[in-house]
Image (cartoon, rainbow, N blue to C red):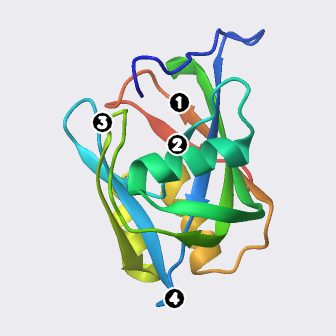
């Protein structure tokens, strides 16, 4: 996150509620766009492009902005939500809500200009390979994408997870919706 990213105040449940938009872009060769993210600890992982919805932004506006910054591509039309993800992490002090749309129309070429400095690469990858790349990251990122790209889960499905623990070394993820 950029230094100027708005950090939400804790809600009545004591958790910071993060609103995030994610995008699925598929090219004419049926490949999926992924971005390579460099994390604070130096690790990297692959995910679909997207990011935090700033105050006053609609999810689609925020998503268009994030995709442009992270990949250089300009999306001119988005689908209705493909899927949603809710992660509740009491020990980490947050609740994450993600809405993911599919790009219906886009143009441009890949040029990274991420003001957050997180995205270090972007490329289109065949579906199965994309899912395998994402598995290094969080379950709540790769699992819903795999369900949509490979298993044909219906649109607007909500995937729910609970993240327990207080650090990377003791974290446990449980899927609640299955």
**Is tag 2's residue or tag 1's residue first in the polypeptide sequence?**
1
Secondary element type, mark 1: strand
**Is tag 4's residue or tag 3's residue first in the polypeptide sequence?**
4
Secondary element type, mark 4: loop
Residue 103 screen position, x and y as percent: 64, 67
Q: Pointers 2 and 1 in contact (CB under 8 A)?
A: yes
State the residue at coordinates (29%, 37%).
Answer: 39
- Residue 117 is labelled as 3
Q: For this view, does 91 lie left or right of residue 10?
A: left
Q: For this view, does 149 lie left or right of residue 84?
A: left
Taking the view exactly as shown, the residue that stands out farthest to the left is: 42
Q: Pointers 4 and 2 in contact (CB under 8 A)?
A: no
Q: Which residue is mark 4?
A: 28
Residue 94 drawn above or below residue 147: above
Residue 143 drawn above or below residue 8: below
Q: Pointers 3 and 1 in contact (CB under 8 A)?
A: no
Front disc: 4 or 2: 4
Q: For this view, does 79 lie left or right of residue 165?
A: right
Residue 61 drawn above or below residue 145: above
Q: How many marks do you count on the picture?
A: 4
The C terminus lies in quadrant: bottom right
The 10 Å Cα crowd at callout 2, few under 14, some 14 to 19, many 20 or more, is: some
State the residue at coordinates (71%, 63%).
Answer: 78
- Residue 137 is labelled as none
State the residue at coordinates (46%, 90%).
Answer: 29
Q: What distance separates the C-alpha of mark 3 from that of mark 1? A: 28 Å
Residue 165 screen position, x and y as percent: 47, 26
Q: Which residue is mark 1?
A: 164
Taking the view exactly as shown, the residue that stands out farthest to the front is: 108
Asked if residue 33 can be seen in this view, the reply is yes
Q: Which residue is mark 2?
A: 173
Q: Nearer the viewer, residue 1 or 62?
A: 62
């Amino acid at each position: 996150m950029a230094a100027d990213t708005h950090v939400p105040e804790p809600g009545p449940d004591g958790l910071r509620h993060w609103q995030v938009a994610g995008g699925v872009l598929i090219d004419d060769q049926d490949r999926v766009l992924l971005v390579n993210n460099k994390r604070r600890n130096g690790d990297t992982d692959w995910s679909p492009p997207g990011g935090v919805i700033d105050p006053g932004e609609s999810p689609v506006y925020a998503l268009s902005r994030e995709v442009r910054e992270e990949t250089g591509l300009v999306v001119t039309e988005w689908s209705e939500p493909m899927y949603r993800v809710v992660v509740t992490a009491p020990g980490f002090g947050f609740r994450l809500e993600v809405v993911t749309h599919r790009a219906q129309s886009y143009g441009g070429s890949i040029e990274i200009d991420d003001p957050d400095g997180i995205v270090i690469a972007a490329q289109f990858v065949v579906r199965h390979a994309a899912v395998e790349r994402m598995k290094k990251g969080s379950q709540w990122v790769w699992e819903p994408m795999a369900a949509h790209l490979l298993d044909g889960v219906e649109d607007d499905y909500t995937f729910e997870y609970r993240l327990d623990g207080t650090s990377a070394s003791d974290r446990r993820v449980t899927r609640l919706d299955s």
